[in-house]
Amino acid sequence: MKGQMETHLGTVVIDKEVIATYAGSVAVECFGIVGMAAVNMKDGLVKLLKKDYLTHGINVTIDDENKIIIDFHVIVSYGVSIHTVSDNLIETVKYKVEEFTGMEIEKINIYVEGVRVID
């Protein structure tokens, strides 16, 4: 389902890919996030995605009530508090995506797929 809003001039429809792209760009700016992760289910391998492929580590669902659910598969920096990074990611993405789309976020799930040492 696509997100939509009714205005006095008509209907605005927002594709899930647009939301995923924006959420991914916001996420990689958060402290402690190295990038999005692609998980190869066949091999169980986790791969750090380049900035051009951020949406592959993000799944956006829009429910029947027009609320957004976002799943992030991320790689975090070594030595940071995963709890703190997750809280920061949730608050930042929630605020910015809600402002960007005008839609409400119901839930943000974060799956930490790996850690990387940053030089």
Image: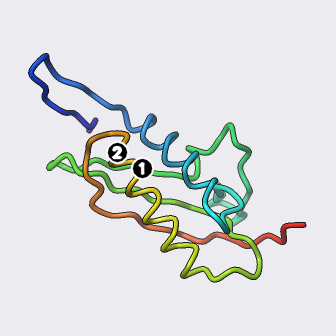
**What residue appears at the point 14 percent right and 50 percent down from the top-left corner?**
65
Instruction: Estimate the x, y position of residue 40 in percent, counting from the top left.
Output: 66, 57
As shown in the figure, which amino acid type bears the numbered disc 2? Glu
Q: Residues within 10 Å of mark 2 (few under 14, many from 20)?
A: few
Task: Name the disc covering residue 96, or none.
Answer: 1
In contact (CB < 8 Å): disc 1 and disc 2: yes
As shown in the figure, which amino acid type bears the numbered disc 1? Lys
Query: Compared with residue 90, is residue 84 higher up or lower down, i.e. above or below?
Result: below
Residue 84 or residue 35, whichever sits in front: 84
Q: Is residue 57 left or right of residue 110?
A: right
Instruction: Estimate the x, y position of residue 82 in percent, counting from the top left.
Output: 60, 80
**What residue appears at the point 90 percent right and 66 percent down from the top-left corner?**
119
Query: Compared with residue 54, is residue 10 higher up or lower down, i.e. above or below?
Result: above
To which residue does mark 2 refer?
Answer: 99
**What residue appears at the point 23 percent right and 25 percent down from the top-left corner?**
12
Instruction: Estimate the x, y position of residue 76 in percent, counting from the top left.
Output: 68, 69
Report the residue that reaches farthest toward the left: 8
Task: Name the disc covering residue 35, or none.
Answer: none
Q: Secondary structure at mark 1?
A: helix
**What residue appears at the point 74 percent right and 56 percent down from the top-left corner?**
48
Label 1, label 2: how far apart the Cα atoms are? 5 Å
